[in-house]
Image: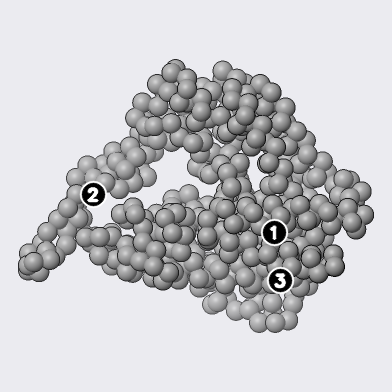
Amino acid sequence: MILQSKNSISYLFLLTPLFLITGPAIPDIVVTLGVLFGIFYIFYQKEYKNVIKLNLFKISIVFWLSLLLISFFSYNKTNSFQDSLIFIRFLLIPFCCYLVFFENKKFFEKSLFIIFVLVVFVCLDTLYQFINYTSKDGFGKDLLGFKSNWYGRLTGPFGDELIPGSYVSKFGLFGFVFLISIKKFKNNIFIQSLYLSLIVLVCYVSGERMAFAAFSLSLVVLLIFLDEFRKSIILSILIGALFIFLAFYFHPFYNDFNVIESTEYHQGQKIEKFYQCENNTEKLCSKFINIQPSFFEIIKNFSTSAYGEIYRLSYKMFLDNPITGIGINNFKYLCESNEFYKKLMVNYDCASHPHNIYIQWLSEGGIIVFISFIFYLYFLIRFIIYNTGDRKYKIISLVILLSMFWPIMSTGSLIKNWFGVTSFFIIGLCLCISKLKIITKL
């Protein structure tokens, strides 16, 4: 009975990357049920003593306790205690992956295959929407009928969420692990390169700069350290660059407008789009549209950009509360309720979170939570390095974590459903990859 239940929940857990496409609710429910069952299963199998011995588990509990500790000093204790208490479900996801649901190598390989298929699907779906474009209305519907509400941004199969680039950049290298872990594709440089270059293209055309930067960084690091597959990676970079060049110079989205005004503010680039008039196709009509600002405008005027103001406010909150921070999930609450902090947001409304993992822990959790999180990352990396898998799998695991926790980039909030489930599920997959050894027949 217990084993049957484990198999059933394992299949649900395995489909988490699919559920993430539907939004935050279903994957959060699935991983929560999975964690509850995982705890029961570990006690049922009397494996809890071995789990407790793991340094990674110990630091996970210390990190969680640090969130609860600073909640006593938070401005809005309800917000802080509520989100700190349930944060334990995220911290336990990696252990459920590693010790319960993906402990069987064959089952884990099924998970890698599903991720590979999902990444390819998201890429093709997003590119279909990219091709389905008119100058007047922007990107059209994807294969599932979703259309972006933001001119110039792609949704792919994610409904109204602008995250297809983020999704494929986070899960893309797991599909690469699938390709290099089976004899059928292990030496197929063309398939490996085409797959990686497809992700590069989707990250670029999606307009998600951080996704593009993170995945590009991953490929560069893999190029340096993963000498066994260096040809595939070089070729993927070249093909990806070629795809981007062709898209940039031939797709009308990049060529059918004039820039009227370019500022660093949110939606601060004003452009005039040209298209054939409906009533007279021989004439050109135009309309003005505000889109996301140029990357160079943001860098040049960073202090008055949205990110600049959010980071400045976060830093001020940290300076005022250096030890315990303002409280978990207190950023927006304090910004809106405190007139001094609210005035620091000159050009924008108060954001929901600081848009950077490290800055968020500093401002909302202070030195206590920040140091706990750094130790968590240290023991996570150490666990992977000293695991029993082949060198190439450890390198890929570390590169995935590097791209996800690279400090100099904007990120989601780890305490929020979608980003939290995604991040800790990926951590669990990285732990599983780091113990892979044998090439499998398919």
Which residue appears at 66% of the width and 31% of the height?
81
The amino acid on which the numbered mark 3 sits, given as a three-letter code, is Glu
Query: Is residue 433 toward the left or the right of residue 187 in the image?
Result: right
Query: Which picture quadrant has residue 276?
Result: bottom left
Q: Secondary structure at mark 1?
A: helix
Sequence-wise, which precedes: disc 3 or disc 1? Answer: 3
Sequence-wise, which precedes: disc 3 or disc 2? Answer: 3
Which residue appears at 56% of the width and 18% of the height?
320
Q: Quadrant of the N terminus?
A: bottom right
Q: Which residue is mark 2?
A: 289
Q: Secondary structure at mark 3?
A: helix
- Marks 3 and 2, how far apart at CA: 46 Å
Q: Residues within 10 Å of mark 2 (few under 14, many from 20)?
A: some
Q: Position of residue 397 (x, y in %)?
A: 68, 57
Q: Which residue is mark 3?
A: 109
- Marks 3 and 1, how far apart at CA: 11 Å
Sequence-wise, which precedes: disc 2 or disc 1? Answer: 2
Q: Which residue is mark 1?
A: 429
Which residue appears at 69% of the width and 59% of the height?
429
Query: Is residue 277 toward the left or the right of residue 149 in the image?
Result: left
Marker count (numbered):
3
Which residue appears at 35% of the width and 66% of the height?
141
